[in-house]
Amino acid sequence: MIRDLFRITGKVSREYYLAAGVLLFALKYALDYGLTAVAFDRPWTWFPYLDPLREMRGINAMMAVDRQYALSMLALALPFIWIGTAMTSRRLRSAELPGWLVILFFVPVVNLVTMAILCILRERGEEVGKAPGAGYGAVPAVGVAIAFCTLAVWAGTGLKNYGLGLFVALPFCLGFLSVLIYNSSGTKSSLSSMGVAALSVVVPGVALLGLAREGLGCLLMALPLALPLACLGGAIAWSIQRGIGAREGTAAMLILMILYPPGVMCAEYVISPQPPLLAVRTAVDIDAPPETVWRRVVSFSDLPAPTEWIFRTGIAYPVRASIAGSGPGAVRQCEFSTGPFVEPIQVWDEPRLLQFSVTRNPAPMEEWTPYKQIHPKHLDNFLVSRQGQFLLTPIPGGRTHLEGTTWYTHNLWPAESWQVWSDFIIHRIHQRVLMHIKSLAEAGGAG
């Protein structure tokens, strides 16, 4: 039986797949707990598997401080990775689904619902003679998606949970759910089904905008993540609905799709994962000595009106900076279009290093909306600047290399996807400030 688990050829029934998965999960959980908490006396979270990518980052970080533990965890995981891949590949073959779907075994959150679907699907040899129905049109399918999405977003924002349940599980399930309904007859084309899957996230987004639940800016930033996931879910549903026997599991899959996103949201709420501390660094060379640049760094006059497109979308941008006092303990205030950052000085090493903490953050943006104003909950303490600094380094020719750094966190998951946007925005803010300092220092004008 053990040899059979490692085999990559042949097929496997849904009962065997489910039983093997449950037993192997229980064994892996016990071994991980024993290795972590007992053998190495390290802290253990009750369910560390919701975001495997974060676990891999953790192993990468541990390699420098606890190589033995990191290598032990990696060695323990390898046979389970092989078995999971092999068993999923065989189960896909048994259900006569495309083999490329095995890559979903490695996609966080999506892998769990994919394995659940494979436990529901019949083998194609079990298909029964049942004439396909007429099916449903795109309007009912997308209508269900709108209702489900609105309720899920309401639940997620009520829990102040902007995580994997909202941005990964929900769009995947919307695409799957809408195509499952639309192609219930198994006769619709793949192209039309993908169109319905795409509409299942676009139309609910428009509905959220109309219901004043979200602004256009955040919806557009979420679209590059949500749209491919919805199409992926739709592609799987279309592949499943090709067989009459597979359609007999439609009711169970509908229930799974409806319950899965709220389940992930509740798990995230209980786990309360800690956001990573991220850093953005931007630099510029200035034709002025550090002593001159320092005075422009500490405080500076009003910046000109922004011309960058990103700041015309409602993203907050810097306006001016002032300081009360000098040396450690002084309070710098950087005024943004949405309010001030309050920055107590921690290090005052003139004219080399100005380092400060951040005790107050304004809203990161003003949402585009057809209403006078809305304020979604994710604008409060979901993108938080923690610390910043200006580092001045003299370079030949009486010039200065000025580097600005911001350390920040955000409570949006998956962190890697949203970090693309947050790093881009903060880098543009840095550039706006540093170029203004450069202009003032090189002109020698009053700050």
Image (spheres, grey):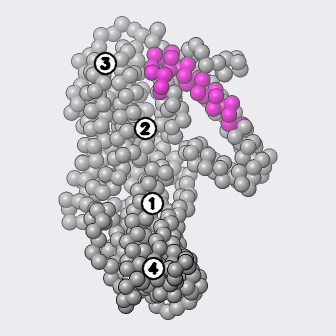
> Which kind of residue does numbered mark 3 sit on?
Gly
Disc 4 from disc 1: Cα separation? 27 Å
- Residue range (magenta): 76-101
Q: Please state which of residues 149 and 5 is positioned toward the viewer in this rendering.
A: 5
Decide which of tag 2 and tag 1 comes sooner along the chain: 2
Q: In the rendered image, which quarter is residue 15 located in?
A: top right
- Indicate the quadrant containing the N terminus: top left, top right, bottom left or bottom right: top right
Q: Nearer the viewer, mark 2 or mark 3?
A: 3
Q: Are marks 2 and 1 in contact (CB under 8 Å)?
A: no
Decide which of tag 3 and tag 1 comes sooner along the chain: 3
Residues packed near mark 2 inside 10 Å, few (<14), some (14 to 19) or many (20 plus): few
Decide which of tag 4 and tag 3 comes sooner along the chain: 3
Q: Position of residue 217 (x, y in %)?
A: 30, 57
Q: Residue furthest front?
A: 397
- Disc marking residue 186: 3
Q: Please state which of residues 45 and 325 is positioned toward the viewer in this rendering.
A: 325
Q: Nearer the viewer, mark 3 or mark 1?
A: 1
Q: Nearer the viewer, mark 4 or mark 3?
A: 4
Q: Are marks 2 and 3 in contact (CB under 8 Å)?
A: no
Residue at x 25%, y 57% (from the top left corner): 212
> Which kind of residue does numbered mark 1 sit on?
Asp
Disc 2 from disc 1: Cα separation? 34 Å
- Disc marking residue 423: 1
- Indicate the quadrant containing the C terminus: top left, top right, bottom left or bottom right: bottom left
